[in-house]
Image (cartoon, helix red, strand yellow):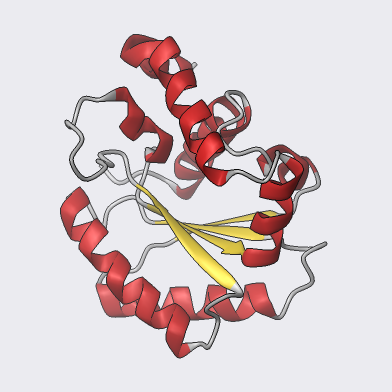
Amino acid sequence: MELSDDTVLADTRRWIEKAVIGLNLCPFARSVYVKNQVRIVVSRARHLDAFLDELDRELDLLVNTPAEAIDTTLLVHPTLFPDFFVFNDFMGVVDDVVAEHKLEGTIQVASFHPLFQFEGVEPDDISNATNRAPYPTLHLLREESVERAVASDGGDAEAIVERNIQTLRALGAPGWQALLAKP
């Protein structure tokens, strides 16, 4: 059964509100989210080329739109990347697309996947949840927004990562699952 766009959007918003903002996994998410500066796009591309065309359009839209209107974009695809390792390998292509658009240093792309796994970390380690979302997601971020947010949170990105891992370890896998459970 194919999930509706409304379901994908609702699941993504629940993850943002309860995990990303609720657990403060991203210290600047709240401010842009409450100002409606987060664009969430559900892709229905049937193959990688069409998905890359959508990525091209979203990159162009983001850089040609004032941050006050769209600060960041989540490009979500609920079905194209069921395998995390295929998705992870695809991130090299995404980096190439950012370079083709001459956006290195302007836009960075963070990846999220329901089965995200850091290299050298066991699949069931809760630290992987820092990059787990309900669906495979490309998060297009303005570099200047990231730099401003990191600076406002003490200027130490590694400290943010470490704090997130500690938060998730304290929550534990059952707590993570309960947090994102559908009402």
Judge from the rendering whether residue 57 lies leftward or rightward of residue 118; answer left or right.
Answer: right
Residue displayed at 65% across by 72% down: 62
Residue 10 visible: no
Residue 132: x and y in percent read 37, 38
Residue displayed at 17% across by 53% down: 85
Residue 109: x and y in percent read 47, 63
Residue displayed at 66% across by 47% down: 150
Q: Is residue 112 above or below residue 47?
A: above
Q: Nearer the viewer, residue 18 or 26?
A: 26
Q: Quadrant of residue 138?
A: bottom left
Q: Nearer the viewer, residue 106 or 80?
A: 106
Judge from the rendering whether residue 139 lies leftward or rightward of residue 39; answer left or right.
Answer: left
Residue 109 visible: yes
Q: Quadrant of residue 175?
A: top left
Q: Is residue 180 above or below residue 170?
A: below
Judge from the rendering whether residue 3 lies leftward or rightward of residue 20; answer left or right.
Answer: left
Residue displayed at 50% across by 41% down: 158
Residue 122: x and y in percent read 17, 31
Residue 84: x and y in percent read 21, 49
Locate the N terminus by quadrant. Answer: top left
Q: How many marks?
A: 0
Q: Is residue 133 above or below residue 82?
A: above
Judge from the rendering whether residue 168 lies leftward or rightward of residue 18; answer left or right.
Answer: left
Q: Quadrant of residue 22?
A: top right
